[in-house]
Every structure is written in C-alpha cells, then in structure tokens.
Amino acid sequence: MHRLSKSVVGHKEVDAVTDVLLKDGYLGMGAEVARFEADIANYIGVSADQVVCVNSGTAALHLAVEAILSKEKYEVIVPSFTFLSSYQAISAAGAVPVSCDVYDNTWTLDLEMAKELISERTCAIMAVHYASNPVNLNKLYELAAQHNIRVIEDAAHAFGCVHNGKKIGSVGDIVCFSFDGIKNITSGEGGAILSRDSEFLSIVKDTRLLGVEKDTEKRIAGQRSWDFDVKRQGYRYHMSNIFAAIGRVQLSRLDSEFAPKRKSLLSIYTTLLAGNENIILQKIEEGNDIIPHIFPVRVKNGKRDSLRAHLESKSIQTGIHYKPNHLLSLYKNDDNRFINTLNIYKEIVTLPLHPDLTEGDVKNICKEIINYLEK
C-alpha cells in the first residue's frame, strides 16, 4: 500500500523521549519546550522570545485570533478552501469567519475578493499557505496595512518554506505552524506561534497556560505558580516536554533528510504529470521555494472520482484536501462568488507524498495515473 501520508520517526526520536521520561522526570511543559522554541527561532532566524509552542496548530490559530479581536472588530477573512481547523479556530475564539474565494491557479487567497470583504468589523485576514504555497505576501501585507488590520498566516503546511529568500515566519505579523504527525516536521502533536508583537505574545503565553499570568517562566524553571492572578479566559494549550523532544529531533532532520526528499518527489511528480492534458498542477507563487507537505492535483473532465477508485484498486491511497467550509452547516454561506473554490473542489485529489516513499514509488503512481487517464 502506498500511503497518502505518514509519520516518519526513528530511534533518535525514541531516545529523546526516553531521556525526558527517565532523566528529566517532568513530562509537562518545562525546559525542553523552551529549548524547542529556541531551536525553531534559530532555524527561522528570529529571537527565541518570538516563538511560543502550543499543543496543536489549531490551538495556535485559536490563541492568535482570540488575542487580537475586540467587540468592535470580530470578523476574520479566511479562504473557504482550507482545512476545517482554520474555521473552528476562528469561531472558538468568539470571532466570525468570513469566507473568501481562492485564485484558480495558485489555490490561495483571492486578495481582490478579500479587499471587497473588508469592513469596519474586520480584525484580521487569515491567509492559508495551501499545499505549502505561501500567499503573495507583499500584496497581502500591503492590503492589511491599507486597512489597519492584522494578518494571521496559517502556515500549517509551510514550515521550512521560503518566500523571496526569507523563511516563512522570519517576517510578517502573526505566523502559525502545525507539527502534527504528518507535517514537514512533527512533534507528535503540536504547533507554534511566531510574532514580533511582544504584547500579543505575552497574552498568548499566558493564555496557553489557563490564563495564569507569567506562568511560562515558572514552568520552564520546573516550578509552578501558587500565588497568581488570571484576567482573561485561558486554555490548556501548552506543549509537553515529550512532544518538544520529538520536535527537536525532527527539526534537526529537516534540512538534511526530509526537505530534500520531499522536494525530490515533488520534482518527479511535476515532471511526469505536467504535460498531461487531464491534469492541472498548482502554480507556485513567484519567489516561493517550498517543502511540499501534500501534493494535490486537479483532474479534469469529470475523471477525479473514477481515478481515485482505480488508484485504490492498485493499493494507492488518495485524499481530497479540502471540502470547502462554506458548504458546511455551521459555516454555511450562499454567496455565489466562490466559483474557483467549487471548481477546484470538484477536481482536487491528493497523491501520496512523504519521506518514506521512493522515487520508484512515485514513478509507478504516475504511470498508473497516466495509463488510466489515457484510456
């Protein structure tokens, strides 16, 4: 079976977790989390105090939204074509997701439509770097600056990716990553928030620990806050030392193992499928150097579902990333402008991509696709 995606961990990760279990003696949030935050900061090129680790990418988005909304500004513009977690994070924070279409070729946020959706209630634009393809950041931040609103980059797919020579997270307003089991690196479960806004980060740090003020410093020192104050709603969103230990090893393997392999497999897919008249590939934004988390393609002429069935019969898993959120009951939106989102959804299929695949595996998958579509 060629799996669609999988966690790729080994003895180094096991040894790191063993050290936490047997040597550190503390499994919750502590010094290992601080070390992971410092490692992430060093990798991306920011200071360690600009990184906050949490227990999931969804938690990162939730905390980011909740920290910036107000009674007057409570709407967040977000592409409908994204994973449900983007929307759930917004609504969980008490904000309102405002659905936006995506471009037909890059499958990322339609900035022209986003501009039309901005109102006096808008607090932020949540731009999703779909399939590791960062949104046109220059235009995105120009738009936000013109209207004095915040930007939250949902970079769950884009850890390690580069835009115009700079790593995602090294510049920008608020950037949220995911480290779940199948991302570019994993910490088992986990996520991170990056920002240069110290006031915002102070809120996020407290909120991840039930709102207990300044509890982060105590936890890192292996202590607890006993006499404390709480001024805002908080959550148990902190990362554990166990997850951080896995993440630190994974990060050390990214540039030497995971990134080259993912890029190599992407290159093979692109080379073999680019000329097929039944396939549409995602256009990578100019200036982007991506480490692909997933590899979705569009299958034309109504052949998507039958192709999926054929590949399944050959033990090749596929997926559909994603069902548009404006079609879901909770976020139903009858705006008729989601033309690109709906067209993409009818045709999108995600092909296997993870570091345990071989180049031969990908060539065989492409062969099955091409042979079937040429029938």
Image: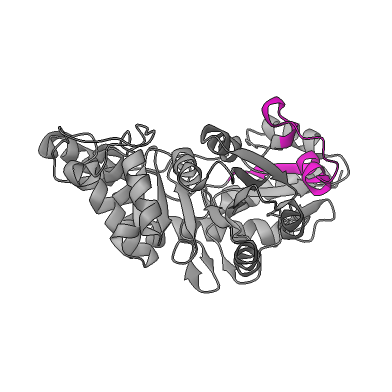
Q: Nearer the viewer, residue 192 or 123?
A: 123
Residue 260 lies within the magenta run: no
Residue 140 screen position, x and y as percent: 63, 63
Say which residue appears at 52% left-offset and 50% top-offset: 358
Q: Nearer the viewer, residue 168 or 181?
A: 168
Image position of 370 with respect to 345: above or below: below
Q: How is the image coloured?
A: one colour
Residue 240 screen position, x and y as percent: 28, 37
Q: Is residue 183 left or right of residue 12?
A: right
Q: Quarter of the image holding residue 287?
A: bottom right
Residue 104 screen position, x and y as percent: 78, 55
Residue 339 lies within the magenta run: yes
Q: Nearer the viewer, residue 114 or 168?
A: 114
Q: Nearer the viewer, residue 82 or 224?
A: 224
Residue 323 visible, this angle: no
Q: Which residues are magenta?
A: 326-352
Say which residue appears at 57% left-offset and 41% top-offset: 86
Residue 127 screen position, x and y as percent: 61, 53
Say which residue appears at 50% left-offset and 64% top-offset: 172
Q: Quarter of the image holding residue 84?
A: top right
Q: Is residue 228 left or right of residue 46?
A: left
Say which residue appears at 72% left-offset and 49% top-offset: 297
